[in-house]
Amino acid sequence: MTKVEADEELRLREELERIAGELESLRAGQDLLAEVLAARGDLGAGHPKLLKTVRAAKKRGERLKVHLGVLRDKYQLTGPDIDCPSLLHLCKARCCTYRVELTEQDLEEGGVKWELQRPYLLRHDADRYCTPLDRGTGGCQVYERRPATCREYDCRADRRVWLDWEKRVPAPFPPEA
């Protein structure tokens, strides 16, 4: 390596270190701003932690997205006329394992938990079912406040649920991930 090349490499390393320092300073400022906004009530208490989680995921090469459903009044929606309680022994409430985007209305009302790692998707437990599902009865513990996606969902034509709706032949339950 020539002296000119060595000098250029040194200059580039120093510039990279300077930029890394500036980036770290910006991150610290971002963290402080998130803490101040959370203290003022402009952000939820968990948002500063979420910011750090997102940053860590980015560092690992993961890409996280915020999933917020379209704002609509879920109480004005009319869903399909399906007698879910009588079908649970067949379908195993598999719709409660599906991804559900919450809306601002759901968040404002509270009572419906969302995934910290994937805001604002309805939270699921280790068994893949959403947290509002009562594992004993198969009923929804937040039925009156359930998200719009749940209100509108019609399983009858969903091949993930029914091989034949009319004959009540359920699809095989997917294997655990």
Image (spheres, grey):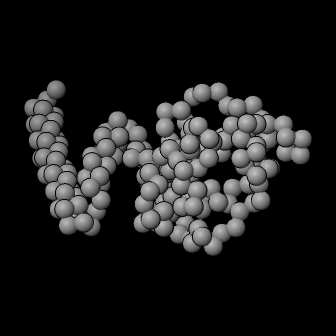
| Side (left or right) of 79 relative to 8 | right
The x, y position of residue 164, in whole percent, is 86, 41
| Side (left or right) of 118 relative to 16 | right
**Quadrant for the N terminus in the image:** top left
Q: Residue at x 63, y 73 (%)?
A: 76
**Quadrant for the C terminus in the image:** top right
Name, please, the residue furthest toward the front: 137
The x, y position of residue 142, in whole percent, is 53, 55
**Among the 4 quarters of the image, the one containing residue 29:** bottom left
Asked if 71 appears above or below 5 in the picture, the reply is below
Q: Residue at x 73, y 36 (%)?
A: 89
| Side (left or right) of 80 relative to 62 | right
Q: Is residue 19 visible?
A: no
Q: Is residue 151 visible?
A: yes
Name, please, the residue furthest toward the right: 167
Q: Tally the numbered discs.
A: 0
The x, y position of residue 174, in whole percent, is 67, 31
The residue lying toward the viewer, choosing from 51 and 13, is 51
| Side (left or right) of 134 relative to 110 | right
Q: Residue at x 60, y 70 (%)?
A: 75
**Among the 4 quarters of the image, the one containing residue 56:** top left
Asked if 77 appears above or below 84 in the picture, the reply is below
Asked if 154 appears above or below 89 in the picture, the reply is below
Q: Residue at x 16, y 47 (%)?
A: 24
